[in-house]
């Protein structure tokens, strides 16, 4: 297993690092609040082919792997780009896998998203990108359905200014039923976990950079505050957290690409050998969420009172780290789910 980036992935990382920095950085994220989406930046993103890059070339997509998408997702997170790329990519891949992906979704001219939780009384609640997506893929009872219609355009109020919305599933087209429906949704949800984890790694990476830069710049008692051990201790352990979360998310993406069916994954705690995609996806989301919340917390404290001021970028990263980590569920419940995967249900 080689988790280092290939030459092509390094090139991909450079292209999207430049794109997100110029078209969707923190200033654009701030301007996009409270809706959480920059429609102009999405139009520019269409020119790169990113919305369809994870789809088969036979459908007009880019044929990229989950590991390739993870490279892009980290750069998206590093700039907290207000773009629903992860939700769109995951739902488009699910639709393509069952031969039901509309052409506008392939092109990205119509946004698709994935409802993370089963519907309740015909309504999918707190759907990520639900405020802007025309198409919602959801579990409704034992059926996987596709609900298409005008997006509400208004997000539910939330601390991270994410485009969350409740979506009705009236008149939705049935895609799959029974075990196949649950399996397809579970696979897409694990891809969402993996890509969201890599985006959280990006948040943690930039939070560390912001904290270090401020510690070098801010002067107290005639010297940079980074000269004081109390400040150094806040930042010293963060690189290990970031690198560890990145490595685990990369392994999850590798597992997703290596064993798409999930039939050959290994969960061997005695030998510390885990290659099961579902297990690694959950682990990566929890670990990356902890890394991002810790990094943004420490960096904000390095900034002192300025860290809470709206004109400073760290507060944007601080809020999104927590919001992205909680979109699926309380991390404690996710940890219990992972424990069931590792040890068997209680």
Image (cartoon, rainbow, N blue to C red):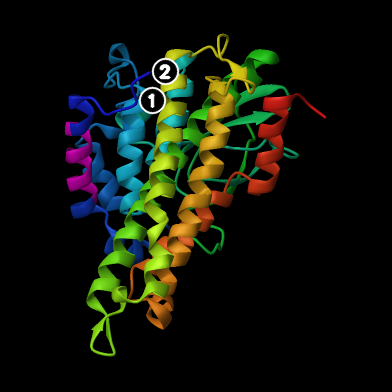
Q: Is residue 341 magenta?
A: no
Residue 185 at what x, y percent from top left? 59, 25
In the image, residue 32 sits, relative to residue 275, either above or below, namely below
Image disc number at residue 229: none
**Can residue 162 be seen from the camera position used here?**
no
Q: Residue at x 18, y 40 (%)?
A: 14
Q: Which mark is residue 66?
A: 1
Q: Magenta span covers which residues?
A: 11-20
Q: Position of residue 28 (x, y in %)?
A: 29, 61
Pick the front one: 126 or 4: 4
Which quadrant holds residue 333?
A: top right
Q: Is residue 21 left or right of residue 157?
A: left
Secondary structure character of the magenta stretch overall = helix
Q: Is residue 308 left or right of residue 65?
A: right
The residue located at (57%, 19%) in the rendering is: 184
Upstream in the sequence, badge 2 or badge 1? 1
Q: Residue at x 20, y 35 (%)?
A: 48
Provide the secondary structure element on which disc 1 rests: helix
Figure quadrant of residue 286: top right
Crowding near the residue tagged with mark 2, few <14, some 14–19, many ≥20 C-alpha atoms within 10 Å: some
| Residue 104 place in picture, x, y as percent | 35, 29
Residue at the spot of label 2: 257
Residue 166 shows up from this direction: yes
Kindly identify the residue that appears in the image at 40 percent across and 44 percent down.
Answer: 199
Mark 2 secondary-structure assignment: helix
Q: Label 1 near label 2: C-beta < 8 Å?
A: yes
């Amino acid at each position: 297993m080689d988790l280092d980036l290939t030459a092509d992935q390094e090139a991909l990382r450079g292209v999207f690092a430049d794109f997100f920095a110029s078209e969707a950085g923190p200033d654009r994220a701030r301007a996009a609040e409270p809706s959480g989406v920059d429609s102009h930046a999405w139009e520019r993103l269409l020119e790169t082919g990113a919305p369809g890059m994870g789809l088969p070339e036979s459908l007009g997509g880019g044929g990229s792997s989950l590991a390739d998408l993870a490279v892009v997702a980290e750069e998206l997170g590093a700039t907290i780009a207000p773009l629903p790329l992860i939700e769109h990519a995951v739902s488009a891949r699910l639709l393509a896998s069952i031969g039901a992906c509309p052409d506008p979704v392939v092109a990205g001219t119509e946004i698709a998203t994935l409802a993370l939780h089963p519907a309740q009384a015909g309504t999918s609640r707190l759907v990520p990108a639900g405020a802007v997506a025309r198409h919602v893929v959801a579990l409704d009872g034992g059926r996987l359905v596709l609900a298409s219609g005008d997006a509400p355009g208004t997000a539910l109020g939330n601390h991270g200014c994410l485009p969350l919305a409740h979506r009705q599933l009236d008149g939705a087209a049935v895609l799959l039923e029974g075990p196949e429906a649950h399996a397809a949704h579970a696979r897409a949800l694990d891809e969402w976990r993996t890509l969201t984890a890599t985006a959280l790694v990006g948040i943690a990476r930039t939070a560390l950079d912001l904290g270090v830069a401020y510690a070098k710049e801010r002067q107290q008692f005639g010297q940079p505050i980074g000269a004081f051990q109390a400040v150094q201790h806040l930042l010293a352990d963060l690189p290990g957290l970031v690198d560890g979360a990145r490595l685990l998310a990369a392994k999850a993406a590798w597992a997703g690409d290596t064993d798409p069916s999930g039939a050959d994954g290994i969960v061997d705690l005695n030998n510390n050998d885990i290659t099961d995609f579902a297990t690694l996806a959950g682990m990566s989301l929890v670990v990356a969420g902890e890394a991002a919340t810790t990094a943004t917390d420490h960096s904000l404290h390095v900034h002192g009172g300025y860290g809470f001021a709206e004109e400073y970028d760290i507060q944007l990263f601080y809020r999104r780290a927590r919001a992205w980590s909680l979109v699926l569920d309380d991390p404690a419940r996710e940890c219990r789910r992972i424990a069931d995967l590792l040890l068997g249900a209680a």
